[in-house]
Image (spheres, rainbow, N blue to C red):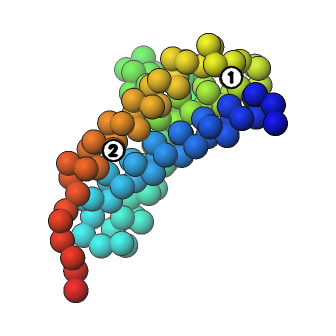
Amino acid sequence: MSLRLTLLFLLAALYALTHVLLAVFLSNFSRNELQAVQMAPLISLPSMALSGMLVPVNSLPDFVQPLARLVPLYYGNRIFEGLMLKGYGVSELAGDVLVVAGMAVLFLALALMTVKDRIDA
């Protein structure tokens, strides 16, 4: 397997882990499974709108552009576009990968701090 394909799978796993940890953190605030499922569109739709997936971030209003840089999907788009379309390697992607890894650690810490110690019978 080529280095780029291996890098693609590793970075996709890191990106997926970041979103799983975000989902775990947010689901800690729901009372039941239905509420947790209902939160998904509240997170995914603004995330897609701010990430540059639908509209380039540069064309968003100036006050919205800093918010776009708080969304993990913004960095995911940059990583996968750089890897698959521009042929970037590890050195060009390092900054974005570090941000995604940092977000994963942050969401893990937040999820651990907000977990409820309960068993519903």
Q: Residue at x 19, y 62 (%)?
A: 116
Point 25% across, 50% down: residue? 112
Farthest residue, direction front: 1
Q: Position of residue 113 (x, y in %)?
A: 20, 48
The residue pinned by badge 1 equals 82
Could you say which quadrant of the image residue 30 lies in? bottom left
User: From the viewer's perspective, is residue 73 above or below residue 78?
Assistant: below
Taking the image as shown, residue 28 lies to the left or right of residue 70, namely left
Q: In this picture, is 20 found above or below 63?
A: below
The residue lying toward the viewer, choosing from 36 and 28, is 28
Graded by Cα atoms within 10 Å as few (under 14), some (14 to 19) or many (20 or more), the crowding at tag 2 reads some
Q: Amino acid at mark 2?
A: Leu
SS of the residue at dot 1? helix
The foreground one among 106 and 61 is 106
Mark 2, secondary structure of its residue: helix
The C terminus sits in image quarter: bottom left
| 103 or 65, nearer to the observer | 103
Residue 99's place in the image compared with 30, above or below, is above
Residue furthest to the right: 1
- Provide the residue designation for mark 2: 108
Q: Which mark is residue 102?
A: none
Dot placed on the residue nearer the N-terminal end, 2 or 1: 1
- Residue located 21% across and 52% down the image: 114
Image spot of residue 1 (x, y percent):
81, 36
Question: Can see residue 49?
Answer: no
Mark nearer the viewer, 2 or 1: 2
